[in-house]
Image: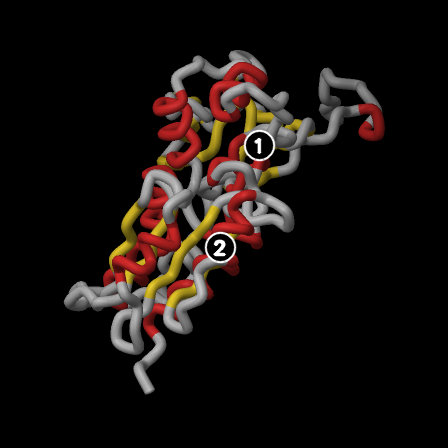
């Protein structure tokens, strides 16, 4: 006798299986059962580890659980082994395994604050060590002309400065224009703070919120996004989601690359 399946549902009415998506590091998904949303940081046999924007980790089984990716249900699977390629640094440069840090150059790159320095280190740190470039932070650029004069840039000691909110008509643009040394390069990004140079998509948010004038910008961002109003902890959560240049806006990438080129340019 012919055996029939007890399931008589026509094939065209059966739900389609969720598409399989490799759980590559950095992929942002939501576990619908708990509402936990985070980026993949590790995928091992049978489990995936997610990290949310506050740095909290959760481990979930891969099967038979479904995850939400941009609103659609998917099945996460272990990434297949990729063909061997040259290793890359976080900035996208070809890595030099075993390379030792070069003795520091006389030239420097100055940034406005500690968060700026930490972000530059996160993405360009390997490149800067090979080139022997030191990054220092200033706690603001109001006294930039005097700082540049005190440094005394020259052909063998070039100075690069990264400025926040360098847009026409801003206080920062007037300060930058007052630096006239041929051996000092001042460039900047358009964002109010270096936080904004991190892509919202890398943090699992739609956009950086607008903060009313007169309100501390970082505190206002935390409040608008429902984060604890602890800007130090918030920054560590943001920095933890930056894994490579792909997590940063192009306006910042171009600025830092120009500064590195300027500082490492051979003396004539």
Residue 230 visible in image: yes
Specify the color scheme.
secondary structure
Residue situated in front as seen by the camera: 153 or 260: 153
Question: Label 2: which residue?
Answer: 176
Q: Residue at x 55, y 49 (%)?
A: 166
Q: Quadrant of the N terminus?
A: top right
Cβ atoms at labels 2 and 1 below 8 Å apart = no
Q: Is residue 16 above or below residue 265?
A: above
Residue 187 on image: x %, y %:
49, 58
Residue situated in front as seen by the camera: 32 or 173: 173
Q: In the figure, residue 268 lies in which quadrant?
A: bottom left
Q: Is residue 30 above or below residue 254?
A: above
Residue 6 on image: x %, y %:
72, 16
Question: Label 1: which residue?
Answer: 75
Residue 31 visible in image: no
Q: Is residue 70 above or below residue 267?
A: above
Label 1 Cα crowd, 10 Å radius (few <14 / some 14-19 / many 20+)? some
Residue 143 on image: x %, y %:
37, 46
């Amino acid at each position: 006798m012919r055996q029939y399946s007890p399931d008589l549902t026509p094939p065209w009415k059966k739900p389609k299986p969720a598409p399989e998506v490799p759980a590559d590091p950095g992929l942002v998904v939501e576990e619908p059962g708990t509402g936990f949303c985070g980026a993949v940081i590790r995928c091992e046999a049978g489990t995936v580890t997610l990290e949310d924007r506050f740095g909290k980790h959760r481990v979930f089984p891969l099967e038979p659980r479904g995850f939400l990716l941009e609103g659609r249900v998917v099945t996460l699977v272990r990434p297949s082994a990729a063909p061997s390629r040259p290793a890359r640094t976080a900035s996208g440069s070809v890595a030099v395994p075993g390379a030792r840090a070069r003795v520091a150059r006389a030239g420097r790159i100055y940034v406005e604050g500690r968060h700026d320095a930490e972000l530059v280190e996160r993405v360009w740190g390997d490149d800067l060590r090979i080139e022997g470039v030191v990054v220092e932070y200033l706690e603001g650029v109001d006294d930039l002309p005097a700082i540049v004069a005190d440094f005394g840039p020259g052909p063998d000691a070039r100075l690069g400065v990264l400025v926040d909110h360098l847009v026409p008509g801003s206080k920062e643009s007037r300060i930058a224009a007052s630096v006239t040394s041929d051996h000092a390069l001042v460039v900047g990004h358009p964002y109010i703070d270096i936080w904004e140079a991190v892509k919202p998509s890398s943090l699992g948010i739609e956009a950086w919120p607008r903060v009313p004038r007169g309100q501390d910008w970082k505190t206002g961002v935390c409040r608008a996004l429902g984060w604890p109003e602890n800007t130090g902890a918030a920054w560590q959560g943001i920095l933890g989601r930056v894994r490579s240049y792909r997590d940063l806006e192009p306006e910042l990438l171009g600025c830092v690359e120009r500064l590195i080129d300027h500082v490492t340019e051979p003396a004539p």
